[in-house]
Image: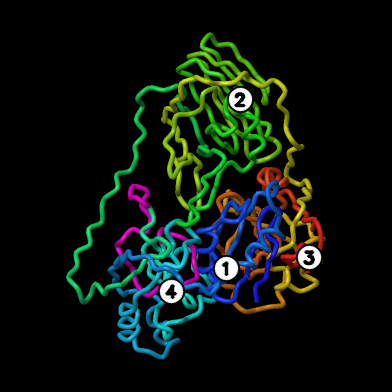
């Protein structure tokens, strides 16, 4: 039975019976897309579909999916890749104990199978591999590790995977490989692509030499530029509107957290709304101007001070164009309200794009490096620009520590995993933003605990910016732009798209109240809610 579950106002989750149906639906929609369909994120037995609400609706997407053939045979990719493994994982003996096999037999069975990359998620280059020996199906660890080394070969349920970078995780580690799963200098960067065939080889039994290319770290060279960075206590990040079309490699969009403020900054200086800006937090950032320029600062209201080459002190206002001359020194103070502010420059910053975007994804480690003191920033030529905008203003009042912020919530896709008391607590509790919050997500705390009525393990499924995931501790986590593409904890709801900018500005110590827009109900293809 297929279920259609709301995720947010522009996304739904199709729950299918098994992975084969998921991959069949994915192949069908990739071959013949539905009108208005924008993005597909496959997972173990779900397919998340993003759509353009001005072109279609969740009910129309559901009707189109319901008409698709889910029993068509899957075409397998001819590409075969090999992964040499040193079977030295810290969970190898535990896996042997769980399966009732010897360590030697676990290794033999794991390296004897031919796998297929079903989909990618969790992190860039993390492939979910199927087709392994059924005897090696083991559960995730009860207590996930806070750090799993890059190259770890691991098992969870019916899947095998290789961690592409150091990250937390709960899979059972059976070995390590020197092969880089994610290399931005490779085309494509992900070693595993959906549909690839994969073989694991035991390094203890073969003489294969694996050459791992050394990657030289980028060194900032002062070769001239417009802005010389003098101080950056909290290194700013280059951001644009996001990196789209890379979900097949496990890469989410990322991008500016307050998109309204980001676009306003570009309009103030006459840029296209999508031009690259700096996203800043805190105070103490300063730079010396080496070329005449026009800048703007929007978002959380920071103090702006300029010391000119002649020694004059200026205090310009945000949301207005600011003309700079060589020798000026610009210093920014920490905002009293909000969290993030944006620095745009007329013409835009000259910065390398990665996978078609200059967005810096802090979880995936994709995008330009953070800006550091001593670095020099270059600008693009100021050509083909628009007139500066003089009527920009904040879209909302920025909250400060201690304030309460109300965020509208779309219930779904997994409220039915929680007790009635948990659903009531979600909507009545004032959840405190903790210091552990970042661009990945806002970690919340409160007196309440959101208890589940279902205790089984949820197969990994797609997540969206604004999703409110509930880990085992019962404390909600509100995903922001750098969230993982897939997650293994149930999502109880998602912040409405129009409140995402506000969510990105809620500071540590403020409180969040969630306001459900309506009770949870499944989507039905005939246009009515179940």
Which of marks 4 and 3 precedes in the sequence?
Answer: 4
Which of marks 1 and 3 precedes in the sequence?
Answer: 1
**How far is mark 3 from mark 4, CA to CA?**
34 Å
Which quadrant of the view contains residue 489?
A: bottom right
What is the crowding at mark 4: few (fewer than 14 residues within 10 Å), some, or many (at least 20)? many
- Judging from the image, what secondary structure is the residue with disc 3 in? loop
Magenta residues? Answer: 164-188
Check if residue 168 falls in the magenta segment: yes
- Judging from the image, what secondary structure is the residue with disc 1 in? loop
What is the crowding at mark 3: few (fewer than 14 residues within 10 Å), some, or many (at least 20)? few
- Judging from the image, what secondary structure is the residue with disc 4 in? strand
What is the crowding at mark 2: few (fewer than 14 residues within 10 Å), some, or many (at least 20)? many
**How far is mark 4 from mark 1, CA to CA?**
17 Å
Q: Tags 2 and 3 in contact by the CB under 8 Å rule? A: no
| Residue 292 position in % (x across, y down) | 50, 15
Colour convention = rainbow
Which of marks 3 and 2 precedes in the sequence?
Answer: 2
Which quadrant of the view contains residue 209?
A: bottom left
**How far is mark 2 from mark 3, CA to CA?**
46 Å
Which of marks 1 and 4 precedes in the sequence?
Answer: 4
Number of the label disc, if any, that sits on residue 529: 3
**Label 2 belongs to which residue?**
296
Circle 3 or circle 1, nearest the eye: 3
**Does 243 sit left or right of 417 as displayed?**
left
**How far is mark 1 from mark 2, CA to CA?**
41 Å
**How far is mark 3 from mark 1, CA to CA?**
26 Å
**Label 1 belongs to which residue?**
488
Circle 4 or circle 1, nearest the eye: 4
**Label 4 belongs to which residue?**
130
User: Depth check: 317 or 69 in front?
Assistant: 69
- The reply to whether residue 36 is visible in this rendering is yes
């Amino acid at each position: 039975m297929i279920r259609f579950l709301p995720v947010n106002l522009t996304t739904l989750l199709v729950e299918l019976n098994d992975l084969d149906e998921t991959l069949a639906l994915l192949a069908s929609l990739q071959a013949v897309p539905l009108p208005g369909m924008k993005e597909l994120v496959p997972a173990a037995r779900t397919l998340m579909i993003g759509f353009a609400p001005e072109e279609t609706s969740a009910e129309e997407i559901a009707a189109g999916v319901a008409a698709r053939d889910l029993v068509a045979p899957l075409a397998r990719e001819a590409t075969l890749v090999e992964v040499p493994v040193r079977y030295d994982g810290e969970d190898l003996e535990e896996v042997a104990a769980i399966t009732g096999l010897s360590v030697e037999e676990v290794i033999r069975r794991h390296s004897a199978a031919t796998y297929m990359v079903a989909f990618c998620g969790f992190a860039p280059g993390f492939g979910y591999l199927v087709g392994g020996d059924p005897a090696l199906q083991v559960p995730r660890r009860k207590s996930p590790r806070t750090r799993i080394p890059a190259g770890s070969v691991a098992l969870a349920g019916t899947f095998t995977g290789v961690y592409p970078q150091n990250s937390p995780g709960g899979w059972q580690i059976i070995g390590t490989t020197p092969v880089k799963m994610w290399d931005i200098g490779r085309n494509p960067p992900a070693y595993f692509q959906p549909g690839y065939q994969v073989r694991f080889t035991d390094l203890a039994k073969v003489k294969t030499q694996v050459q791992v290319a050394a990657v030289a770290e980028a060194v900032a060279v002062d070769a001239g530029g417009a802005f010389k960075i003098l101080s950056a206590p909290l290194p700013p990040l280059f951001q644009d509107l996001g990196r789209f079309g890379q979900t097949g490699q496990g890469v989410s969009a990322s991008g500016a957290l307050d998109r309204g403020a980001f676009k306003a900054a570009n309009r103030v200086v006459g840029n296209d709304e999508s031009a690259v800006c700096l996203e800043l937090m805190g105070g103490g950032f300063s730079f010396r101007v080496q070329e005449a320029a026009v800048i703007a600062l929007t978002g959380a209201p920071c103090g702006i001070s300029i010391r000119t080459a002649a020694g004059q002190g200026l205090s310009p206002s945000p949301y207005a164009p600011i003309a700079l001359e060589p020798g000026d020194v610009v210093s920014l103070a920490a905002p009293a309200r909000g969290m993030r502010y944006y620095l745009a420059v007329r013409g835009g910053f000259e910065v390398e794009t990665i996978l078609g975007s200059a967005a810096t994804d802090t979880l995936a480690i994709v995008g330009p490096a953070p800006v550091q003191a001593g670095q020099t920033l270059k600008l693009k030529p100021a050509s083909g620009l628009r007139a500066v905008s003089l009527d920009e203003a904040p879209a909302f009042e920025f909250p400060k520590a201690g304030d309460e912020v109300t965020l509208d919530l779309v219930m779904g896709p997994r409220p039915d995993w929680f007790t009635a008391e948990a659903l009531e607590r979600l909507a009545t509790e004032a959840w405190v933003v903790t210091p552990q919050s970042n661009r990945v997500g806002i970690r919340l705390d409160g007196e309440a605990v959101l208890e589940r009525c279902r205790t089984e393990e949820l197969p990994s499924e797609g997540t969206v910016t604004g999703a409110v995931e509930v880990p085992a501790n019962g404390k909600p986590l509100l995903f922001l732009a750098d969230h993982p593409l897939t997650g293994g904890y149930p999502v109880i709801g998602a912040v409405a798209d129009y409140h995402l900018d506000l969510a990105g500005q809620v500071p540590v110590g403020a409180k969040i109240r969630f306001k459900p827009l309506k009770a949870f109900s499944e989507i039905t293809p005939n246009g009515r809610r179940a």
